[in-house]
Image: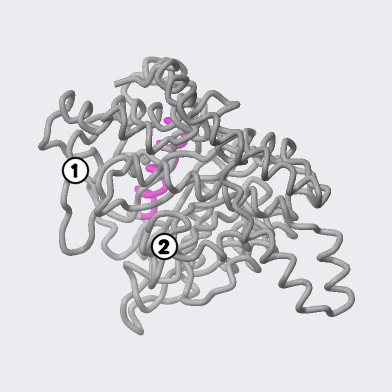
Amino acid sequence: MKIEQYHIDQHNDSLFSRHNNQFIFLQEQLGEQGIHAKDIVKSLEAFQVAIPSWALGTGGTRFGRFSGVGEPRSLEEKIEDVGLLHALNRSSGSISLHIPWDIPGAAQPIIDLATSLDLKFDAVNSNTFQDQKDQELSYKFGSLSHVDAKVRKQAVEHNIEVIKHGVNLGSKALSIWLSDGSCFPGQSNFVKAFQNTLESLQEIYAALPDDWKVYVEYKAYEPNFYSTVIQDWGSSLLFCQKLGPKADVLVDLGHHLPNANIEQIVATLMMEGRLAGFHFNDSKYGDDDLTVGAIRPYQLFLIFVELVEGMKRANRASDTYAWMIDASHNVKDPLEDLLQSVEAILIAQAQALLVDRKKLEQARNANDVVLAQQILQNAFRTDVRPLVREAMRLSGGSLDPIGLYRHLGVRNELLNERGKLTVATGL
């Protein structure tokens, strides 16, 4: 299925009057504060969030998976689904592939399909956290950190293969997440595990093209519960510093222990110039992979407060970082969930752009804690949805992406095209 521009234009026409009134009202309110609404809209238009290929089907838990209908059965259908999202919000202009779940056949037809939908390829992701069919050696006890050099070699070669796929598609980064660790005391030698991982990463790093990056992700626990080789941002940063300037830290919002101050982590990584970007999601208890902004929208806002300041300090545009959603849609239509997540990210970005940095710094220097809090919360409590909608409209997207998605009966159309008993590849 393809959403035509006239579908979007007709739907927008029916909503424009109300939207325009809301936008003008907010524009006047912000103008009284010396804030130019159109500048924020322009910034939002430029902000693009990558969609991971594995998020286009229904997710699951350790106990079961309840497949949806009309799920994409191939990489081509996954790209088409991202095309649907991007047509609706004009903010989902790239797709991130997970190898070997989504191995391209011939690269050029895949590139041509993506180009026809105005999509690019974001970072490619390797997978050594599970064994694949016909795999010679197992990753049960680790991959890049494994005590057996043959297993480490197999994992290194897989990552190099992933790089080659990415080069063929025009990607510019490799994203690595390791599940390596131990479940019980005494199972692993911490120092040897670190050294083995570093040596393996150095081999992968040496295979990177000159204009590529490697993103090193961290996670406190799961599937190993006693120790994880790359367990926090500090260990990830240490690996990146040892590897070189082409290695940066990737932050997944769900990969932290309870009550971690993620915004402080972000500020520190940006200060050091080692933030690669984000895997966006939300959580109540752990790595829940819930819809972005569904549980802790204020934390998301505070993270963007640091992101906006860090980008300005480094004089870097938003497109020099990697922004990607990493969620599991267990009970929702995946496409609706992704539309919600992208909107939540744009809302947080817009709210962060409202913060009066000069007044905030003055409040900090005066130790005026009340005023500093007030400045942040005033920005957070501002309904910036008219700005997000305007950015989507001006980019050719819908004023109400989910509303139009439902109005067009997209999921039913996908059901008719693909069938009821479909399971997305890789899941």
Query: Which structural element holds mark 2?
Result: loop
Provide residue 248's location: percent of width, then percent of height.
61, 52
Q: Which segment is the magenta one?
A: 152-165
Q: Indicate whether residue 159 is drawn in magenta.
A: yes
The image's mark for residue 215 is none
Q: Which amino acid does the dot numbered 1 rest on? A: Gly
Above or below for 124 versus 187 = above
Q: Which amino acid does the dot numbered 2 rest on? A: Ser
Residue 353 seen anywhere in this rendered image of the structure:
yes
Query: Which structural element holds mark 1?
Result: loop
The image's mark for residue 68 is 1
Q: Earlier in the sequence, mark 2 or mark 1?
A: 1
Please name the residue that numbered disc 2 is placed on: 145
Residue 93 seen anywhere in this rendered image of the structure:
no
Q: For the residues marked 2 and 1, what is the alpha-carbon distance in whole angstroms?
A: 37 Å
Provide residue 81's location: percent of width, then percent of height.
34, 30
Q: Main secondary structure of the magenta part?
A: helix
